[in-house]
């Protein structure tokens, strides 16, 4: 299978911005094992700004755009050094790709991006993709967010499945942090108005990016036949369940042609 895995800052770093070593090492070990089993893995990784804030001891509450971009520059170095070091332990090579919204919107640049991704996979490398927050001056995450970026990447390289690792187990009928009767939705056959309503708004509290962007990502990829799964980033072992066709988190089924 060709699998795109998006991992968020809440999985990679502690609240203060420092690397969550246990979580990252476990994630890398599982991704490396899946590659050993013959799967193609593409990692869409957040975390650069958060790690830069921690490393530079910045005041998160009072940061302007240049400060966030500086944090991204420092944090991206640490992030890639970590991935390079850990994947190398399992004899896997990583390649960094940083993109902006212009790289997706311009046909020639998008074509170049797709060619680079596919060539890295042909050579057996593991691409690590993030938005280039050091130069994205319109707004940080001008692609939308890394849920959307994960969907863009999955479509660009014809992935079989997109996995969004979040800080929640999946899509619920209501906010499980506030409603004890909230029920996890295991499978979504079609994204209806009811499913969209379950996502709530951007301030729904269902994770750092909310569920709305995740539903949007699901709409993007399922139209092309790609499945999407939302799982908890603190349970990376569920990646094994996903490739084995077992239940994990919330599965959005791609439309079969």
Image (cartoon, grey):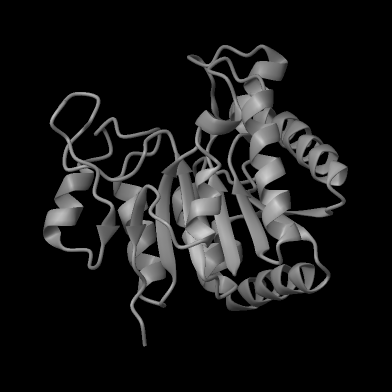
Tell me what residue is drawn at x 63 percent, y 52 percent. Answer: 43
Q: What quarter of the picture does the C terminus occupy?
A: bottom left
Residue 119, x across and y down, in percent? 78, 73
Tell me what residue is drawn at x 26 percent, y 33 percent. Answer: 203
Residue 205, x across and y down, in percent? 28, 30
The residue lying toward the viewer, choosing from 178 and 90, is 90
Q: Relative to 79, is 222 above or below?
A: below
Q: Answer yes or no: is residue 69 visible.
A: no
Q: What quarter of the picture does the N terminus occupy?
A: bottom right
Tell me what residue is drawn at x 57 percent, y 14 percent. Answer: 16
Q: Is residue 120 left or right of residue 161?
A: right
Q: Relative to 2, is 28 above or below?
A: above
Splitting the image into 4 quarters, where does residue 59 fall? top right
Splitting the image into 4 quarters, where does residue 206 fall? top left
Q: Is residue 74 left or right of residue 205?
A: right
Q: Is residue 99 left or right of residue 187?
A: right
Splitting the image into 4 quarters, where does residue 55 fall? top right
Residue 42, x across and y down, in percent? 65, 58
Tell me what residue is drawn at x 31 percent, y 55 percent. Answer: 215
The residue lying toward the viewer, choosing from 161 and 246, is 246
Q: Answer yes or no: is residue 183 visible.
A: yes
């Amino acid at each position: 299978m060709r699998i795109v895995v998006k991992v968020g800052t809440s999985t990679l770093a502690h609240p203060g911005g420092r690397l969550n070593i246990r979580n990252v090492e476990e994630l890398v070990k599982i991704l490396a094992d899946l590659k050993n089993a013959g799967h193609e893995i593409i990692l869409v990784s957040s975390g650069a700004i958060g790690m830069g804030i921690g490393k530079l001891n910045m005041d998160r509450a009072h940061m302007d755009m240049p400060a966030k971009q500086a944090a991204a520059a420092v944090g991206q170095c640490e992030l890639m050094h970590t991935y390079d070091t850990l994947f190398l332990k399992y004899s896997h090579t990583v390649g960094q790709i940083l993109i902006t919204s212009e790289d997706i919107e311009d046909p020639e640049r998008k074509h170049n991006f797709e060619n680079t991704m596919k060539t890295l996979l042909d050579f057996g490398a593991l691409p690590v993709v993030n938005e280039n927050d050091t130069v994205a001056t319109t707004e940080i995450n001008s692609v939308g967010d890394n849920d959307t970026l994960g969907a863009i990447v999955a479509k660009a390289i014809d992935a079989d499945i997109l996995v969004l690792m979040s800080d929640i187990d999946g899509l619920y009928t209501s906010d499980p942090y506030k409603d004890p009767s909230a029920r996890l939705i295991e499978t979504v056959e079609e994204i209806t108005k009811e499913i969209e309503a379950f996502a709530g708004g951007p301030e729904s509290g269902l994770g750092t990016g909310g569920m709305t962007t995740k539903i949007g990502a699901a709409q993007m990829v399922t139209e092309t036949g790609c499945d999407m799964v939302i799982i908890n980033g603190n349970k990376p072992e569920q990646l094994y369940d996903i490739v084995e066709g077992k239940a994990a988190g919330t599965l959005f089924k791609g439309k079969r042609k």
